Amino acid sequence: MITPFEALDIILNNMKPLGKQKISIFEADKRVVADYIYSKLDLPPQDNSAMDGYAIRFKDIQQIPAKLKIKGTIKAGDSIDGLSVGENECFRIMTGAFIPKGADCVVEFEAAKEENGYVEILKQKKLYANIRFKGEDIEKNARIDLIGEHLNPYRLARIVSTGNIFIDVYTKPRICIIATGNELVYAGDTTPFATIDSNSLFVKSLLKEELNLDIDYLGISTDSQEDLKNLMETALNYDIIITTAGISFGDYDVVTNIEKQIGIEWLFKYVKQKPGKPFAFGKIKDSFIFSFPGNPVSTAFCSFFYLLPALKKMMGLKKYLHIPIKAKLKKSMVKRNDRVHFNRVKVEFKNDNFYATPFETQGSNIIESIAQCNGFAMVESFRLGEIAKGEEVDVFMYDFKSIFEKRR
Ligand SMILES: Nc1nc2c(c(=O)[nH]1)N[C@H]1C(S)=C(S)[C@@H](COP(=O)(O)OP(=O)(O)OC[C@H]3O[C@@H](n4cnc5c(N)ncnc54)[C@H](O)[C@@H]3O)O[C@H]1N2
Ligand code: MOO
């Protein structure tokens, strides 16, 4: 059986960006930039004031206090055509207003005293004090290289400020999910003894939150081969097909049972890991198929560890690998087999160190463990027995933010 990192390599080697398209910046959250962007303008468009105060000539304030005649007021957006500051003159000027000809310094109101059309400058200032120069943020035609980066509020503000409203991005993958299992019912169904399909909502929500990707839920297939084959026909219209459950060794493991009939070519089947051993990845016609084990923690781990990097690469992101952090165990853990374990832990950040508390039960069916924790602590295959309190472990964080936010 292959290791988790071998499995990840196989998946990533098969992923490549799908294509490019032009979209509106107003619908571009979390999309990935596919081409250079060029500024259509200088920002600021002209030299302007950083303070409310007086636009003056530096020369005129060599002796303090200096008395200057006020010629008028300039506010942000006013034209400065024909305006100029001569010897011992000044303009009242507001933040963002353009600097009139002749002025080379702005003195803020607080450093001056105004009376009867004159102002007395009380504090020495440097040449060009409080002046923001034309193009100092970005110059016209400057190239913005965000290729392979995702768009976020910070970058969107950058781009929209340069006069661009359409940008080239990579095409989004089309993704669908099918849950399998006779025991499953849809969310909200209260049929006694049934299991609610939580995996589909999990994957849908994960991809929305992490990548702003939408996925189509094709529904629940029973363990009947006909049922799944029908749904798979629709699924073939998608770039990525996700199935959950029915992939291990049981008589009714329906994905396993139809794989030959519908022509799935597995690129690997099963990984030496816990959770998620019966995870399989393959190709079917023009689509890739990720078949996750049914246990909710297994689906959660496989989605996080394999599907997210795969989709990131397919979306054109340059950075698609998870980086683990080092955390000290606050409680010991026990490992009884030679699979690589990814145990659910709750990581905290205290006195410049990360500390990980393992969840008390590590069964792949315990949804509470993923809901309460924020990371997967990796324990290598060769480790057997106790992993002692105080030992440092690699943790792949699935909820980083939770570490860096606190109550008042
Ligand atoms: N003989 C063997 N049996 C099993 C092995 C094995 O190696 N040999 N591996 C075990 C491991 S590890 C796992 S993980 C499971 C995964 O099996 P499947 O992927 O075939 O999943 P099922 O057996 O159909 O379901 C497992 C479990 O998960 C629940 N489930 C299924 N779908 C959902 C869903 N959409 N939402 C919530 N819960 C779901 C299901 O009811 C089962 O309880 O196989 C072991 N067996
Ligand atoms: O791999 Mo299974 O996911 O251990 O329970």
Image (tube, helix red, strand yellow):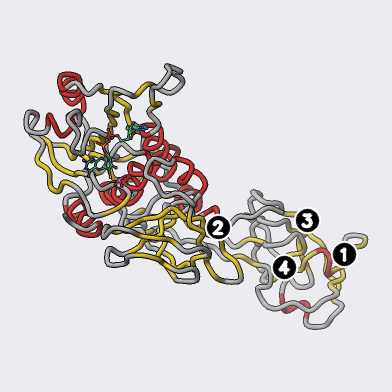
Q: How much space separates mark 4 and mark 3, taking CA atoms? A: 14 Å
Q: Is residue 334 above or below residue 65?
A: above
Q: Quadrant of ligand 1?
A: top left
Name above or below for residue 52 compared with residue 230: below
Question: Is disc 1 placed on a helix, strand or loop?
Answer: strand
Q: Residue furthest bottom?
A: 63
Q: Nearer the viewer, residue 324 or 2?
A: 2
Q: Tag 4 or tag 2, which sits nearer the N-term?
A: 4
Report the residue at 87% width, 70% height from top: 120
Residue bearing mark 1: 118
Between the C-alphas of marks 3 and 1, the distance is: 11 Å
- Percent x, y for residue 47? 59, 63
**Alpha carbon distance from label 2 to label 3:** 54 Å
Amino acid type shown at disc 4: Val
- Amino acid at pointer 1: Tyr
Q: Which is more toward the observer, 349 or 83?
A: 349
The disc, 4 or 3, on the residue closer to the chain's N-terminal end is 3
Residue type, numbered disc 3 = Gly
Is the residue marked by circle 2 packed among few (<14), some (14-19), or many (20+) residues within 10 Å?
A: some
Q: Which residue is mark 4?
A: 106
- Check contact, mark 2 vs mark 4: CB within 8 A: no
Quadrant placement of the C terminus = bottom right
